[in-house]
Each structure stands twice: as structure tokens, then as C-alpha cells.
Image (spheres, coloured by chain):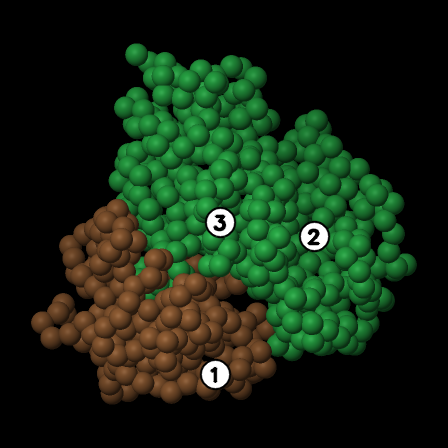
């Protein structure tokens, strides 16, 4: 019996797809510059079924790639060598809710925001809040170690995962981690979170639930220049304030917001800084007042504080709708992700504008300024010959600069296929050899989401030619 | 432990952090790794050698308004940052600032074969590659010997120093929220309700579902399953195929 037939026997005909349309749909995630079609897409409903699928992949020496909602921005869920794509879209059960101990047990396909909805009545939430949180899944967040605007205070996904169930590349099911955090032992959860499916398929996890703050104060400061706004960010942190969010948007995002939604801001605004403090009412008010003083000392054109939930939502509009609004500027958008030390933000932004101009691509910036996590968004028309190549080249220049300034090639989007080659900018040959040794913990890893994270894996160069061929 | 006499691998005793176990593998003098090598207060980042006492590091950081918010209850802060990193034990400000592991941005380490490597970066947010630097926290040098740490530091103004008495501790026990009242009754002042942590002498008097225990003499830390321990052993074999570094004998599987 062939692989396809055995998969149907395991999952039923409804759990297996291999038609041309399905293959095309699953050829890429939200990093659509590169594509590679899987041969078969499967939809298991339990850890045991995932284990069965993985064992069959081993039997037939077929690569497998796990995928959540496909919102990843670095190609982590692309089936680089074809094979079986394991969708978690039917692993959607919340298995247990332990309100008293502030933890929840869910399958990997549960949507991020559904976790918060499940516990909202108890004044709790799941803290990681990537922009995709209304659709992205717990498993995807774990695979990419997703962040979001509030990671400045609450940390990335890794800090909110207590334990997990993993199907290893040989099909074995293993539980790792503890129900209570901070155990002083080597922490395998740390390695599996962000491993992009290279160490196996995460099928379930216990997550930490965070109490909703008693008070939230959100403000929007308008500055004449990006430099003033970034200086405000540095001064706020130096003052000992740990805001819940510090998000910066540049002039081109404002153009997009005006074009897309008719939003208009103070005349002369060159940058907007969204600030949020949370905690006890007294400290929140104090921190917000301190931040206002800092912004005004630096010449803020305005500082608007939300007094109601509706006003707060309105202030967040610029940040939440910024990328969507860019659809008014061009038919294609590629969002990059790099990190730099916060003090280098002015220098880095100047470089981003210079690179975009040189490559004749539009660029706008909206990003997590508090932790130096830059997101240059290139907007362009992919029907224009050579534009995709220009976008890839410009992106690589920017990432190189991030590393030169002491930063990282990725702050929250992961490595995927987009940046596996760029990892060599950060790490020496021996550093990368040690990274590759992590793969040793899962045994036979050659078939487990190949060509991701670690550069120059066997057989990946040939496949890379194929992806780029499709893209162009 | 004499200043400058830092040896690694160390075997920790939570009461007095010992540098060495008799009959163990050969020691390596790392006392030269005792300075700050990079400091950028505006970016909240410092790099220092592992043989720098935490008090000295914090003294230097205080000059620019920053600190490492680690407040141990079982050892003096004159111990080395590498020791605190290698053990990653709970501390009095855990609930507010997290564990030592949470502040690690990068590590320079010596692999079992003697070569130096680096993991992580100076960026305060970074998902490039596997988080080996955080994995090594609490690893007691079993996978690699840390030489230099890059840490996220915090503004002094935001770090209250908690009241605490440094004492001999035989074991730490993390208690679920639902068991806090019972733990308070059982352990009295040895139970810290803010961190939900028992730090006491003798043996744990009771186990609760989901808790963990790290005992100090002899050193023991728990993993959740035999499968997890098997994975750690595979990883150990991958990083240290000739068993040159300390073993994983301190790990045991949590009884169901």
C-alpha cells in the first residue's frame, strides 16, 4: 500500500487532501515570496493520529511539515521538500481550564485569541498577542516563538508555555516541561519553543494565564521626527518605567492610514508613538503622567490619553490597521523583522529609508520600539519585472545592518526559509555547529520540517532554486 | 570559596555554593573571566565574565542606574554570576522579574571539545536559532561551560530590594496556587507566598499535583517524565559525546 492509501486508512478520506487546488493553497504561508507545494495535506484530530502520520512518513522516507493557520512570515510552514503537510486545523479542543492555578491545556490548533476568550470572564488572558492573534494558532505561536506589542512587558510565547506534548520525528509521543514554571533544571521547553517544527510536532500545551491588569492607560504621542520619538522611548525606559507597550509608526504609515481609513493626525507629524501603561490604578496613572512629561520635554506635538475603552480602541487603530492600510499604497507587501539595540533606532531607520530608495521600493515602518524590534514593510507591485528580487535584496541589506549594529536577524517572525542563510551573519561556523547539535535530541530529524532554522542542510540548496524559480 | 579561585564545573550545594566535588572530572580555572566586557545602559545590556561576583557587577551597574534583580535567599550575592546562572535557583524577586534564565540574552561557552562558541545576541528580543543560551541556564555545565554572559539589566528605580534572610536551604518547592494556604500552615515562614516557594531544611513534607522540588544536598532537580529525561540524555550525548562534562545524575523523574 502506498503512503496516500495508508494515510486515508489512518485519518479517513476526509482527513487527506492531494488535489491541485489544495496543494496550491498550502504552497506557502504568509511569506509568499517563496513557494513549494506539499504532495499531501493531512488533518489529524489527535496526538495519536499525528504520531501515526509521522510514523508513516518515516516508513516512506517522506518529509513532513507542521502548519497552523499559515500566518507565519518567514516560510516556516512551507513544505520545502514537498512531502506531507500536517495541518493542526482540526486540533482545536481546549482540553482543560484550571482557573485557580491560572493555566489552560489546549491542542495546538486552538486560535490564540480563543484562549483568552475562554478565560476572559475570570479576568485572565493569554499574554502573547501577535498581530495575527485572531487567526494564528497556539502551535504556530510556539513554533515561531511569537511576540506582539505587549511582549515588552510580558515576554514572548516562550515565557507563557509551561509544558507541551510533542510527537518526535520517529513518532514517539513525549511530554516535556512542568505545570509550575521556573524549575531549576535544563529547560527543554526553551528549545522546542521557536524550533519551527524541526524537533517534532507540538500537539498540545499547557499555557500560563495572566491576570488582566486592574487599570490600563493608553496614550498616543505625535512627534515631528522619528528621532524624537525614539529618544522618548529610550528616556522612558531609563526613567525606570516598564510600559506594557511602546509602538512606533512613521510618516509613511500615516499616509497609508489616511488613504485607507481617512485617519488624520496633528499637522507636521513625522512619527506616532503609542504608549500603554498597565497595573494598579495609582501606578498606572503615575507612569502615564511620567511618560507624558518625557514626551513633552522632547517636543511632542500632542499627547492624547484615552479616557474610555472606546477611545483606547481608537488610539490603537493606527497600530492595528497600519499594515492593512498599506494595501492602498501597492498590491504587494513584505514585512521584514529584525532587531537592533534600541539606541540604534535612529541610525537604523535612516538606513532603511536609504535602502528602499536605492531599490526603488516603498517602505513604511511600524514596530515594537520598546524592544528595538523593527518591521520595515516594503510595498511594491510584484508584476513589475525584477521587483521581487529587489525586495529580497533590500531585505537582506537591512538584516545585515541589524547584525552589524549588534542586533539579530529576527525578533519574532522566526527563521523559516527566509532567513536560514542569513543566520551565518550572526553565527560563526562553530556557533552553527552547536545549533545543529540541538537537532540531535530528536533522533531522526532529516524528515522533520527540513531546510528550516539551520542553514545549508543536505539537499536544501537544490530545493531553494526551485522555490525562487516559482516565486519569480 | 576564595575570590579568584573559581573553578568549573561546579557542584552546587544550595547552602554554600561549592566549587567542586571530590573525585569529579578535571577542574578548569576560569578566574580570568571576571570583568564587564560590554555595557550599554541605554539598551539595558551588559556582558560580563562568569567569575564576576554579582555584588561587583551590580556595583558597576549602579553607577549608571541599572541592576541585575537577582536576590537569592540561600547564598550571598558575593557569589559569582556564573554560579547563579548555572544553578538558576529561585530568588526573592522571582514573581516580579522572572528567573536568571529570563534575563540571558547571549552566552559565550566552551564546548566539551574545548572550542568556544556563542549563542544568542545583544538584542533584548531575539528568535534567531535555538535558545541554547537559555537552555544552558540551570544546566550545571553539563552541556557546555559558560564563560561570558550577556544579560538584560533593569533600571534601579524599578527594582525594590525585598526583605529576606539569607539562610541554609535544603530544598526549594514550587507550590500551586491552590495549595498556598496548606503550604503556609506546614512551613510557616519558610513559605514565601508571593513567589509560592518553600525554601526550607530537611525534606518536603508533602507533594502537590503539578509542584516541583529542587533539593540541594544532595543536588536534585526534577523533570516531568522519563521521556523528557531520555531527550536530555540524547542532547547531552550530542553536545558532549565523550562525557567530558558533568553528568546528568542530578536529574530525576517527578513521581506521578
Placement of A299 over or under A115, stated as above or below: below
Horizontal side of A257 relative to A101 (left or right) equals right
Q: Which residue is mark 1?
A: B162
Nearer to us of marks 3 and 1 is 3
Residue A358 figure quarter = top right
Q: Tell me, for residue B207, which label it has, or none.
A: none
Disc 2 versus disc 3: distance between alpha carbons?
A: 35 Å
Labels 2 and 3: the sequence-earlier one: 3
Q: Nearer the viewer, mark 1 or mark 2?
A: 1
Residue A106 position, x and y percent, is 47, 43
Chain shown green: that is A
Q: Nearer the viewer, mark 2 or mark 3?
A: 3
Number of marks present in the image shown = 3
- Which numbered dot is residue A366? 2
According to the picture, the residue beneath numbered tag 3 turns out to be A97
**Could you say whether the residue bearing mark 1 is in a helix, strand or loop?**
loop
For the residues bearing labels 3 and 1, Cβ distance under 8 angstroms = no
Residue furthest left in the image: B23
Left or right: A298 as drawn, with respect to A53: right
Amino acid at each position: 500500500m502506498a503512503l496516500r492509501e495508508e494515510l486515508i486508512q489512518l485519518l479517513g478520506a476526509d482527513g487527506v487532501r492531494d488535489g491541485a487546488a489544495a496543494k496550491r493553497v498550502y504552497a506557502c504561508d504568509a511569506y509568499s515570496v517563496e513557494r513549494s507545494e506539499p504532495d499531501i495535506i493531512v488533518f489529524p484530530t489527535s496526538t495519536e493520529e499525528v504520531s501515526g502520520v509521522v510514523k508513516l512518513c518515516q516508513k516512506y522516507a517522506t518529509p513532513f511539515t507542521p502548519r497552523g493557520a499559515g500566518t507565519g512570515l518567514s516560510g516556516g510552514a512551507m513544505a520545502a521538500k514537498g512531502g506531507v503537510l500536517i495541518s493542526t486545523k482540526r486540533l482545536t479542543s481546549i482540553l482543560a481550564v484550571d482557573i485557580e492555578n491560572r493555566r489552560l491545556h489546549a491542542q495546538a490548533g486552538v486560535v490564540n485569541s480563543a484562549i483568552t476568550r475562554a478565560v476572559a470572564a475570570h479576568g485572565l488572558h493569554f499574554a502573547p498577542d501577535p498581530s495575527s492573534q485572531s487567526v494564528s494558532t497556539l502551535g504556530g505561536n510556539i513554533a515561531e516563538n511569537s511576540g506582539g506589542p505587549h511582549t515588552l512587558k510580558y515576554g514572548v510565547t516562550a515565557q507563557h508555555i509551561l509544558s507541551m506534548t510533542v510527537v518526535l520525528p520517529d513518532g514517539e509521543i513525549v511530554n516535556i516541561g512542568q505545570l509550575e514554571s521556573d524549575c531549576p533544571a535544563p529547560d527543554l521547553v526553551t528549545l522546542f519553543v521557536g524550533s519551527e517544527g524541526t524537533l517534532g510536532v507540538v500537539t498540545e500545551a499547557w499555557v500560563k494565564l495572566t491576570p488582566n491588569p486592574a487599570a490600563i492607560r493608553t496614550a498616543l504621542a505625535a512627534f515631528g521626527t522619528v528621532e524624537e520619538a525614539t529618544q522618548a522611548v529610550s528616556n522612558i525606559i531609563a526613567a525606570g518605567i516598564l510600559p506594557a507597550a511602546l509602538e512606533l509608526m512613521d510618516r509613511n504609515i500615516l499616509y497609508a492610514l489616511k488613504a485607507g481609513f481617512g485617519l488624520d493626525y496633528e499637522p507636521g507629524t513625522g512619527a506616532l508613538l503609542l504608549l500603554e501603561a498597565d497595573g494598579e490604578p495609582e501606578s498606572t496613572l503615575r507612569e502615564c503622567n511620567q511618560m507624558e512629561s518625557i514626551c513633552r520635554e522632547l517636543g511632542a506635538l500632542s499627547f492624547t490619553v484615552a479616557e474610555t475603552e472606546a477611545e483606547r480602541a481608537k488610539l490603537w487603530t493606527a497600530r492595528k490597521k497600519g499594515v492593512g492600510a498599506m494595501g492602498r499604497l501597492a498590491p504587494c507587501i513584505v514585512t521584514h523583522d529584525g532587531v537592533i539595540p534600541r539606541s540604534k533606532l535612529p541610525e537604523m531607520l535612516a538606513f532603511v529609508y536609504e535602502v528602499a530608495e536605492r531599490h526603488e521600493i516603498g517602505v513604511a515602518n511600524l514596530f515594537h520600539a520598546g524592544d528595538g524590534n523593527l518591521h520595515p514593510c516594503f510595498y511594491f507591485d510584484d508584476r513589475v519585472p525584477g521587483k521581487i528580487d529587489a525586495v529580497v535584496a533590500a531585505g537582506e541589506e537591512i538584516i545585515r545592518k541589524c547584525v552589524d549594529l549588534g542586533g539579530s536577524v529576527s525578533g519574532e517572525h522566526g527563521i523559516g526559509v527566509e532567513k536560514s542563510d542569513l543566520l551565518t551573519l550572526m553565527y560563526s561556523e562553530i556557533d552553527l555547529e552547536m545549533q545543529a547539535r540541538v537537532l540531535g535530541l530528536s533522533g531522526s530529524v532529516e524528515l522533520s520540517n527540513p531546510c528550516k532554522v539551520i542553514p545549508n542542510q543536505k539537499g536544501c540548496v537544490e530545493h531553494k532554486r526551485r522555490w525562487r524559480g516559482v516565486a519569480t | 570559596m576564595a575570590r579568584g579561585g573559581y573553578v568549573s564545573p561546579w557542584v552546587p550545594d544550595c547552602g554554600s555554593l561549592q566549587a567542586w566535588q571530590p573525585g569529579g572530572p578535571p577542574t578548569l580555572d576560569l578566574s580570568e573571566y571576571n570583568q564587564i566586557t560590554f555595557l550599554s545602559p541605554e539598551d539595558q545590556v551588559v556582558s560580563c565574565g562568569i567569575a564576576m561576583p554579582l555584588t561587583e557587577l551590580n556595583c558597576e551597574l549602579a553607577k549608571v542606574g541599572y541592576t541585575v534583580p537577582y536576590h537569592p535567599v540561600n547564598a550571598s550575592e558575593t557569589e559569582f554570576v556564573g554560579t547563579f546562572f548555572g544553578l538558576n535557583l529561585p530568588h526573592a524577586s522571582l514573581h516580579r522579574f522572572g528567573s536568571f534564565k529570563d534575563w540571558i540574552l547571549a552566552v559565550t561557552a566552551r564546548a566539551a571539545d574545548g572550542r568556544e562558541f556563542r549563542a544568542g545576541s545583544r538584542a533584548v528580543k531575539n528568535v534567531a536559532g535555538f535558545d541554547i543560551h537559555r537552555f544552558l541556564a540551570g544546566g550545571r555545565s553539563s552541556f557546555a561551560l559558560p564563560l561570558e554572559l550577556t544579560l538584560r539589566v533593569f533600571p534601579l528605580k524599578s527594582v525594590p530590594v525585598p526583605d529576606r534572610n539569607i539562610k541554609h536551604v535544603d530544598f526549594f518547592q514550587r507550590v500551586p496556587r491552590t495549595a498556598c494556604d496548606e503550604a503556609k500552615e506546614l512551613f510557616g515562614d519558610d513559605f514565601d507566598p508571593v513567589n509560592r516557594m518553600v525554601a526550607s531544611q530537611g525534606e518536603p513534607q508533602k507533594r502537590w499535583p503539578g509542584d516541583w522540588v529542587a533539593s540541594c544536598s544532595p543536588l536534585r532537580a526534577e523533570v516531568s517524565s522519563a521521556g523528557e529525561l531520555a531527550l536530555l540524555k540524547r542532547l547531552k550525548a550530542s553536545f558532549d559525546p565523550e562525557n567530558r562534562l558533568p553528568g546528568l545524575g542530578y536529574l530525576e523523574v517527578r513521581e506521578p
